[in-house]
Image: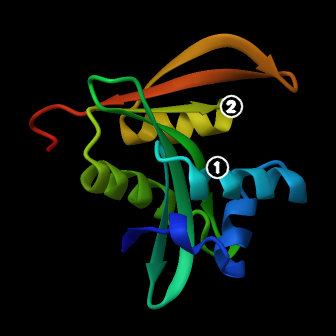
Amino acid sequence: MLERIDGRLEQPQLQELLSYAVFPDPQVLEAVIHQYSTQDHMHLYGYQEEGEWIGVIGCAEEGEAPYTLRVRHLAITPAERGKGYGRGILLELLETAEPAVLLAEADDEGAEFYRNIGFTVIGNGELNAASERYICRYDVEEDDE
């Protein structure tokens, strides 16, 4: 079940999950936690199954219309990776938050992940650590809602 967890980031297990999606530096993690805790346009959701936190997805609202969310962080606990939780969390986010557009930025591997879910993937020409970056976009159609 996907639920908002912005107000529960003092929990060590949630902090650990979020740490998998940020640069491995305690100061960076602290800054990201502060953003989700204090900025109204940023939302952090957690997914749990049988009382255990499996993953987190963080997003930020962008623009006025159509309602657009940009995925900022997506992480699955290492023991549960490769089991479809990332895909499931993204699909639940579409149902829960009801954006008209969902965006994400990704590297080569991440772009393939988003492409397999149905996102349109466009190279943005930027290189980061010798890897091209991609913009991934999912337009929710009226039939999807």
- The picture places residue 26, in percent across and down from the top left corner, at 88, 59
Q: CA distance from mark 2 to mark 1?
A: 23 Å
Q: Disc number at residue 35?
A: 1
Question: What's the residue at 36%, 35% (across, down)?
Answer: 118
Label 1: few (<14), some or many (≥20) within 10 Å? some
User: For this rendering, which residue is in front, 14 or 27?
Assistant: 27
Location of residue 4 by image quarter: bottom left
Quarter holding the N terminus is bottom left
The residue tagged with tag 1: helix, strand or loop?
Answer: helix
- The picture places residue 2, in percent across and down from the top left corner, at 39, 68
Residue 24 in view here: no
> Can you identify the residue that label 2 sits on?
107
Between disc 2 and disc 1, whose residue precedes? 1
Question: What's the residue at 59%, 59% (across, down)?
Answer: 37
- The picture places residue 133, in percent across and down from the top left corner, at 68, 22
Number of numbered markers: 2
Location of residue 137 by image quarter: top left
Please name the amino acid that badge 2 sits on. Asp
**Residue at the extreme bottom:** 50
User: For this rendering, which residue is in front, 106 or 95?
Assistant: 95
Q: From the viewer's perspective, tell me whether residue 99 is left or right of residue 50.
A: left
Label 2: few (<14), some or many (≥20) within 10 Å? some
Question: What's the residue at 49%, 27% (across, down)?
Answer: 136
